[in-house]
Every structure is written in structure tokens, then in C-alpha cells.
Amino acid sequence: MLDGFRHAMGVKDIPATTSVDARSALFRSTVHGRRILVLLDDAASGTQIRPLLPGSATVTVVVTSRSSLSGLKAMEGATGMNLEPLDDTESLSLLREIGGADLVDHDLAVSTDLVRMCANLPLVLRIVGERLGSGGYHSVAELVDELTDERDRLDVLATDDTSNAVRAVFSLSYKALEPKAAELFRLLGLLPGSEFGRDAVAALTGLRAGQLRVALEALRSTSMLEVPAPQRYRLHDLLRAYAAECAEVVESADRRQQAVHDLLAWYLSSAHATGRVLNPYRRSDPQPTAFGLSFDDAQTAMEWCSLEQTNLTAAVCLAAKVGEDATAWQLAAALWGFFYRRKPWEDWIATHNIGLAAAERTGDEFGTATMLGNLAIAYRELRQQVEAEDCFRRALEIWMRLGDRYGEALVCNGYGNACREWGRLDEALVHSQRALAGWQAVGDRHGEGITYNSLSGIYRQLDDLPRALAYSSRAAAVFRDLGDRYSEAWAQHSTATTQRELGNLTAAIELRRLALDIRVELGDRYGQALTLQDLAADYERTGQAEGRLEALRRALAIFHDLGDPKADEIEAALG
């Protein structure tokens, strides 16, 4: 390349020397004092670039590279500039230019999905644009359908010019990696999600901390891995598909299976750890292991679950896919505390249906009943009565057949609450009394407190307000004694409603505000919305119109955000 540069500048007599240093010196002498722009495209490393640096203030060198070239910045004073991917608007503009505006603009939402499938990469956008412009597709949606399966996406993006195909471009970066970084890249293709934390990668790969840090940095510096936040990494779907292909070719089936097993075990252990702080009074989960994460309080557990929600849901799917059926239902069950507090309905129901199928495949009745009971609660809160009742009945039958009083009590309590909401108060009372007897049989005070609160609601609807007040007060006392502020807020909320029905509006509003304060402090958004909805009813009784409207609007915003059907009630109340 040095000789080629000198030939281009009219130097004919080039000494036959094999020394790179000598050729570099001759190049510098040739360009000295000239005003020249040197463009070096797709450089692999600083070592490749240094002989081409002229050392003259009149010469500007522009280098493009997949690598960060940190050595050039540190030793040669180079100025770095990261070229970010195109944004959606820019990507759509490029797609219109190549594929045709009519197709792209016909359904902008689908076209936006397409550019994101392409990771907003110009090369990939050009390939799909050419496909659209070829006349082989009636709509963008047809191409999106072909690209939906990540396993086939690289095949769909293949071109006649193999040197410019997506695989070929990725291959250049992959083949330049050191062995440990290449191994890491391959194993990342086994991850169920595209964004992940360092701890998950450590579990997947088994690399020591130092090795992992170096390998991750190698991938980051070559733009094969993004770092959206400290110790968080992102591998876009196209690269992840390529990594999975490489893993299938290079890694043995046993190695891939072990890596996935270790990752799923880590997710399961960490999810159990969230359950121990979010549901400390539920039936004991396996004891903590050194393998997973640990959490000091409910807030950090909820934050981790929120951050990893997509990966946790995908991990349940992956466990079922690879035949780890016990892990599939256990992981779904371990996320109960997060699901119940945050109400991500779609993931809650999806993971539990996958877990249910997994438990049924292996004839695991304990797992089957656990999944059914949790699904029943979700369906009940979404007001899908047929599905909820079916799950309650099936779960109850299994627990009774197993002679499991704890499981029976748990389902009876939920079934009783559901029957109360459905207006079947006699059934509600029977189920709740069975639940109370079950808790007492197994010596579970917290369970007793939950059912005391359920009985309070039933007796309130039966117009036995003194008994309703007695049960909710008893529940609050149990929860205070156990230090469970989350459940105490439920009891205070129930007591407030009874006080309102008794005409004690000042006491009702005071208790409601106390419950709201606890729920705000704990980050219980669903509980906040329920309390605000009832606080609005309290304000209506006292003629506080502005307070009522403000409470309803706040509740509506939360219910809308959670996708809860109670939002419809509030919209109707607001007119």
C-alpha cells in the first residue's frame, strides 16, 4: 500500500526494500509539505495504520474501522468519533429511496418494524430496500414475515454478491477476534434476549472475571457489542443470529447444552432470590446459592425483575424449548411476587401457560397446580371469569388429591375473593373459611391474615359491617406484628372501605391516605391505583369534587399504564 501511494503521487523509482519502516519513511518524505487527505477505510488495527501516518501538519488522515483503535488515540493523539446507527427516521428515508416510498409509507408501523429488524444498519437496509424495489413483494409486511424467524433472517438477507452479504461482513469482524472473545461471541448467540447483564454472561460462559472483562471489551471495541448502561450489553438480533450459527458450527452440542443449562440455573436462582424478599411469607423456595444474585430489599428485587423482564420471560420459553421443563415452571413460579405487584399481564400469562404445559408434560402435579393457581389470579384480575374459574377448580382438585393443605388454602383464598367479585357470596364464604382452616392447620399466620382480610370484604358485601371491620382490623394486626407493610396496606384499605360504609368518612379518608402512603413508598403502583379509585369514592361522599377528579385521574393513568380493565370503569366515571 505504501508503494501504491507513492506511485499515485508520481514517484517512479521505488527502492526494492522489504523494510516496512523504510518504506514508511519514504512515504513521509514524499508527502511532506503537501496538502493531502489520506482516507484509510476499514482498518483492522493501529498496527496496520501507523506506517501510513505521514507526520506532517499539512496532511490529514481519516480512518474508518470497526475497532475503536484505542492505541492510536493514546499513542498518536488521534481523535475518535463514534458513528452511531441510523435512527428510525433516517432508516425509513433510506428505505424509501431504494425500495420505493409507496410501499414504505403504506404502513409506517410495519416499515418501522422492518428497519429495526435490520438493526438500522445501512448495508442491511440497502439489501431489504433492493428486495422491496425488485417488485417481488406486494407489501412491506410480506418481507417482515420472512424476517420474523431469527434463525432464517441471515438467509433471507443473502445476496448474489457473497462478499457484500451480511454474513460476509460479520465474518470479517468475527475472524479478527482473539480466541476467548470469539468464544464469548459464539456463546452470546445462545442467550434468549438481545440485552443482558454481565452476571448473566458470566453464568453462560463460565469465564473468570478478568477473562470476561477482556473478552467483553474486545467485542465492544470492535462494535460487535453495544454498552447501553454500565455492565449492560446489547447484541442486535442480526449479530445474535450470526453468533448462534457460529456456536452451532464450532461449539459441541454438550458445550452448548451446558452453557444454556448454567444460564437457566442462574436465572432461576436469582428469581428465587427476588421471591424471598417479595414473598417472604410464601412457602419456602430453595435455599440461596452462590450461583445467583441476592437482594437486600423489595425495591432492588423489583428493579432487577423490571430490568430483566424480557429476558426472564424468554428464559422460561428457552427452558421449555430445550427440555428443561422443571426449570420452565419453577422460573415462572419464582416470578410470582414481581408479576403480582407489577401486573405485566401478557408476560405473567405467557410464562405460566408455558410452565403449565411443561409441568403437565412431565406429570408434575405440584407444578401443574402451582401454575393453575397463579393463572387463576391473573385471569380473575383481568375479569376473564371462565378461564379463572377453570384454573381455580383444576388447581383445587390437584391440591386436595395431593393432600397439600397449604396449596389448598392458597387457592381457596383466591377462589373466595373471585366468588365475592362475581357476586356469589355464599360460595365466597365457604372457600374463605376453608382457606382459614387450612392456614391454621399448617400454622401459617400470614396466610391467616390474608384470609381475615378476604373475609372482611365478604362480610362487608353481606352488610355485616361490624364483622367486616373486626376481620380487617385483625388482619392489619397480624401484618404489623409480622412487619409486612405491603399486606398491611391492603388491610388498611379494606378497613377504610368499611369505615366509609359505616359513615365514618373522616376515618375512612385518613386510613386510605395511610394505605396510599405505604403503597407509594413501596412502589406498589397497582395498589396505589386501587386506593386512589376508592379515595375518589370517599371524596365523593364528602362533596370534595376536585379531590375526587384528581384521584380518579391519577388512578386512570396507572391503570392505563398497566393495561388493567379497571381503566374502563374510571373513564366511565369521568364521563
Image: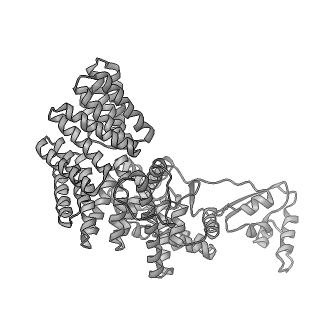
Q: Residue 311 at what x, y percent from top left?
A: 43, 59
Colouring chosen for the image of the structure: one colour
Q: Residue 134 at what x, y percent from top left?
A: 40, 61
Identify the image quadrant of residue 449: top left
Residue found at x 50% / y 75%: 246
- 425 relative to 192 in the view: left or right: left
Let me know if residue 135 appears in the view. no
Q: Quadrant of the C terminus?
A: top left
- 236 relative to 38 in the view: left or right: left
Let me know if residue 289 appears in the view. yes
Above or below for 274 versus 224: above
Q: Residue 38 at what x, y percent from top left?
A: 75, 60
Q: How many marks on residues?
A: 0
Q: Residue 516 at what x, y percent from top left?
A: 38, 33
Residue found at x 42% / y 56%: 276
- 193 relative to 441 in the view: left or right: right
Q: Quadrant of the N terminus?
A: bottom right
Which one is in front, 487 or 88?
Answer: 487
Residue found at x 29% / y 30%: 496
Which one is in front, 540 or 216?
Answer: 540
Which one is in front, 113 or 157?
Answer: 113
